[in-house]
Image (spheres, rainbow, N blue to C red):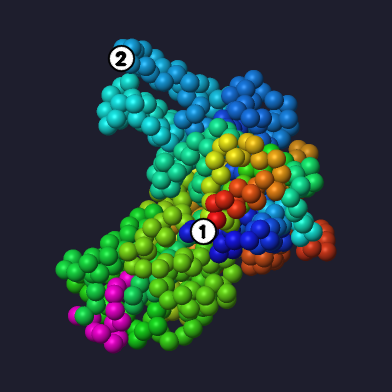
């Protein structure tokens, strides 16, 4: 991860050095390739260039199709062979208020204004539906920025003849569509242009000179915002906060100043700013973001600080609290192991630049936002969109609970001498069955998030999962697991493709690391074999493709009793299992419900 | 700022924007002399030059500028 591509970034530097940056980022390992079609209503060249470097920084290597100038409508509605052949994964429609043709005039009555609104909306709706009918892709559509002048002054926002009013209503119609549609996301340029400053954003020099709908120095902000949606779709969001305490969550040093002298609470400005920051952090729990502490402190002082009467965050809000004198990068490694999460999914928040520097140089891929003064903490963290919400599932709401339950399980495990006895004491129940519509979103999410217990590291967008679900030549199973401590939700997925009538090829086998060593993978295999037999399958083929992260499943198929067929120099392995003979179920600790 | 100094800083901007360390700009240099200098890169070049010297070109200037020499003349009047 290049610091230069994190907010706040130096636009001058990016515009001048994008070619160098691109070359550097192309050297990174393990980039996933995605095809992005940009259908523009104005010039898009620099938007593409900037998007490319931001995506590369997120580990996504894009290839592009770019429509001819202002041909977004024609490309979508009448088709274009080049676009068809390109077959995009993502279609970005870069339109702006310059592409609204039918603005109301003062002579229009209410009905005419309404008709203009419907006609503008239906133009865009046609574009989206045509594209959806043709491509199995995700669409990202700009909303509209406000106009740069107001004929009616303040009334422009209120009166039906005002452009501002018209744009607001059109935006709302876009949002209504987005709330109903799947695989459709809004790129909120209305917000981005506000943050940037509308007068600067709408610098008309760039429109009349080059047909850019915003000034060129604003483009990095637009492309960054867009890249954040795309990285979220492909599971590159961060998952957890790792937070320092002194001068990060409160003002002052609890060990030196004492709890009673910390700045937090409504009495003084510096206390208010930390209170608001604590509220901001705490609100992330509802988004499924895991909160942890990493502080150089005596443990008891840390707990005392977190129990401050005016504090919003309490010790119970955190899954892991590391308050000790170890180097912070060591603590982060421990937290990652205890949570079974990659440290590259953490956001480390610390007011001390030296600590940030150490952590970012020792921990690959971790985000260490350059927070400066307390009143800027929220903006700087927020504008980095670490947790951009594209697919929000009910699982996310419960995530902190799930991790808490896991902590309880570890405690209980310590009381058993025999692991099998421990597993039995959990009284696990699993539901393993074919995909159901209500879980498709979660299944797609899991396929994009799982890195460690993932045999092929194949990623599926929601559209891909829907396609699999509708195709009868796949056997597709999800597994849910619950035990006495709680329901883990959908935690495992496998997709097998039937070929040559009696062969099943396992394209995807994933499991959440929350349920490692619970025998769930054996329960899944038992069910897969059962389903395969129903479909008259004789041989199941399994594939293991090594990545930097999935070593833990290197011998997965060996443990499942498969036979190695081949292995190449990169360590890619093919296995097979003959199920025409006897197959003995391997799971004996989970009760699988019908 | 002296003309030499402007040319030196301008040369660095050109090298960064076109990612080519061999570029040496002269007063008579035009887009024909640099391979990647098309109309789209021209925009980025103008923005980078503006940022380097802390100036803004107006529309009339950008449309009539014929070569690097004329660009430098405008920069001279502003810095």
Establish whether labels 1 and 2 are both on one chain. yes
Task: Judge by depth and name the residue closer to the eye, A423 or A307.
Answer: A307
Residue A319 lies, in percent from the top left, at 39, 69
Please, is residue B64 above or below residue A256 in the view? Answer: above
Q: Magenta segment, which residues?
A: A249-260
User: Which chain is home to disc 2?
Assistant: A
Task: Judge by depth and name the residue closer to the eye, B12 or A64.
Answer: B12
Residue bearing the label numbered 1: A9
Please, is residue A59 above or below residue B32 in the view? Answer: below
Residue A45 lies, in percent from the top left, at 64, 40
Q: CA distance from mark 1 to mark 2?
A: 45 Å
Residue A238 as seen in the image, left or right of residue A322 = right
- Name the residue rendered at 43%, 36% in the picture: A145
Q: Is residue A179 magenta?
A: no
Residue B57 lies, in percent from the top left, at 56, 44
Q: Which mark is residue A110?
A: 2
- Name the residue rendered at 60%, 47% in the picture: B74
Residue A295 as seen in the image, left or right of residue A9 = left
Disc on the earlier residue, 1 or 2:
1
- Name the residue rendered at 50%, 43% in the picture: A441
Q: Which mark is residue A411?
A: none
The kind of secondary structure element at disc 2 is helix
Q: Is residue A297 visible?
A: yes
Disc 1 packing (10 Å; few <14; some 14–19; many ≥20): few
Q: Is residue A250 magenta?
A: yes
User: Which chain is home to disc 1?
Assistant: A
Task: Judge by depth and name the residue closer to the eye, A169 or B16.
Answer: B16
The kind of secondary structure element at disc 1 is loop
The image quadrant of residue A90 is: top right
Residue A85 lies, in percent from the top left, at 73, 32
- Name the residue rendered at 30%, 86% in the picture: A255
């Amino acid at each position: 991860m290049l610091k230069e591509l994190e907010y706040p970034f130096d636009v001058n530097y990016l515009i001048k050095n994008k070619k160098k940056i691109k070359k550097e980022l192309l050297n990174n390992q393990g980039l996933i390739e995605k095809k992005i079609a940009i259908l523009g209503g104005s010039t898009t060249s620099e938007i593409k260039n900037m998007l490319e470097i931001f995506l590369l920084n997120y580990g996504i290597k894009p290839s592009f199709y770019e429509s001819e100038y202002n041909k977004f409508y024609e490309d979508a509605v009448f088709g274009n062979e080049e676009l068809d052949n390109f077959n995009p994964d993502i279609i970005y429609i870069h339109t702006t208020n310059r592409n609204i043709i039918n603005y109301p005039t003062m002579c229009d009555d209410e009905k005419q204004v309404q008709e203009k609104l419907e006609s503008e909306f239906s133009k865009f709706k046609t574009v989206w539906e045509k594209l959806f009918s043709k491509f199995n892709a995700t669409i990202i559509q700009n909303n509209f920025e406000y106009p740069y002048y107001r004929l009616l002054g303040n009334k422009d926002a209120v009166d039906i003849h005002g452009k501002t009013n018209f744009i607001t209503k059109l935006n709302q119609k876009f949002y209504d569509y987005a709330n109903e549609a799947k695989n459709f996301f809004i790129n909120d340029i209305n917000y981005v242009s506000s943050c940037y400053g509308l007068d600067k954003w709408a610098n008309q020099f760039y429109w009349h000179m080059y047909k850019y709908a915003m000034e060129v120095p604003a483009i990095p902000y637009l492309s960054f915002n867009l890249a954040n949606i795309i990285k979220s779709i492909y599971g590159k969001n961060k998952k957890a906060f790792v937070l320092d305490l002194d001068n990060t969550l409160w003002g002052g040093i609890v060990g030196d100043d004492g709890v009673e002298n910390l700045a937090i609470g409504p009495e003084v400005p510096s206390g208010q700013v930390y209170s608001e920051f604590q509220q901001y952090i705490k609100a992330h729990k509802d988004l499924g973001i895991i909160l942890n502490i990493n502080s150089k402190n005596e443990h008891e002082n840390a707990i005392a600080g977190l129990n401050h009467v005016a504090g919003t965050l309490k010790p119970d809000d955190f899954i892991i609290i590391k308050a000790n004198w170890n180097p912070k990068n060591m603590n982060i490694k421990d937290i990652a192991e205890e949570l079974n999460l990659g440290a590259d999914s953490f956001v480390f928040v610390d007011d001390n630049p030296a600590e940030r520097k150490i952590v970012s140089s020792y921990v690959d891929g971790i985000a260490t936002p350059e927070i400066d003064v307390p009143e800027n903490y929220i903006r700087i963290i927020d504008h980095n969109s670490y947790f951009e919400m594209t697919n929000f599932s009910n699982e996310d709401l419960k995530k902190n609970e799930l991790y808490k339950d896991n902590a309880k399980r570890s405690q209980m495990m310590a009381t058993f001498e025999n692991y099998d006895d421990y597993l039995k004491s959990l009284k696990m129940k699993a539901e393993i069955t074919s995909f159901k519509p209500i879980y498709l979103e979660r299944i797609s999410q899991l396929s994009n998030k799982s890195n460690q217990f993932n045999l092929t590291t194949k990623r599926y967008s929601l559209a891909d999962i829907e396609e699999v679900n509708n195709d009868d030549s796949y056997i597709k199973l999800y597994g849910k697991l619950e035990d006495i401590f709680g329901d883990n939700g959908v935690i495992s997925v496998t997709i097998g493709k039937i070929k040559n009538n009696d062969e099943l090829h396992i394209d995807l086998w994933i499991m959440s690391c929350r349920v490692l060593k619970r025998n769930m993978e054996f329960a899944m295999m038992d069910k897969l074999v059962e389903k395969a037999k129903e479909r008259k399958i004789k041989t199941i083929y399994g594939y293991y493709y090594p990545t930097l992260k999935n070593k833990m499943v290197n011998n997965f198929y060996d443990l499942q009793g498969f036979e190695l067929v081949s292995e190449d120099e990169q360590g890619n392995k093919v296995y097979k299992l003959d199920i025409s003979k006897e197959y003995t179920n391997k799971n004996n600790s989970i009760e699988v419900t019908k | 700022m002296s003309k030499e100094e402007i040319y030196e800083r301008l040369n660095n901007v050109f090298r960064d924007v076109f990612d080519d360390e061999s570029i040496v700009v002269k007063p008579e240099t035009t887009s024909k002399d640099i391979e990647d200098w098309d109309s789209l890169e021209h925009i980025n070049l103008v923005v980078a030059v503006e940022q380097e010297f802390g100036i803004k070109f107006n529309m009339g200037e950008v449309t009539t500028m014929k070569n690097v020499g004329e660009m430098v003349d405008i920069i001279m009047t502003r810095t």
